[in-house]
Amino acid sequence: MVPFGVRSVLGFGGVLPRGELFAVIVFARIPLPPETAEMFKPLALSVKLAILPFANGPLFDE
């Protein structure tokens, strides 16, 4: 991480209805205060809702 200047790492995720996990990891070059990190909590639900339509089928063609 040092060569890229990463100062903060923020991650969140969840479980989809069939048991699959998803995760989002954000790397920042600036320090993120705890107050800013707290604002990402609602984003986990929004990401889950955005990917739910794709959760029942294959993501890639074989």
Image (tube, rainbow, N blue to C red):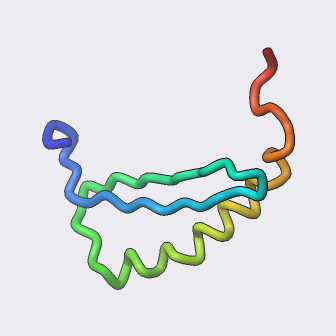
Residue situated furthest front in the rendering: 19
In this view of the protein, which residue sits in the foreground, 8 or 62? 62
47 relative to 51 in the view: left or right? left
Picture quadrant where residue 33 is located: bottom left
Picture residue at 61% right of the left edge, 50% below the top: 21
Picture quadrant where residue 8 is located: bottom left
**Position in image of residue 58 (x %, y %):** 81, 32
In this view of the protein, which residue sits in the foreground, 25 or 18? 18
**Position in image of residue 29 (x %, y %):** 25, 55
**Position in image of residue 24 (x %, y %):** 51, 53
Determine whether 36 is above or below 60 in the image: below
**Position in image of residue 31 (x %, y %):** 22, 67
Marks counted in the figure total: 0
Picture residue at 54% right of the left edge, 60% below the top: 13
Residue situated furthest left in the rendering: 2
Residue situated furthest top in the rendering: 62
Picture residue at 49% right of the left edge, 73% below the top: 40
Figure quadrant of the C terminus: top right
Picture residue at 76% right of the left edge, 32% below the top: 59
43 relative to 27 in the view: left or right? right
Figure quadrant of the N terminus: top left
8 relative to 35 in the view: left or right? left
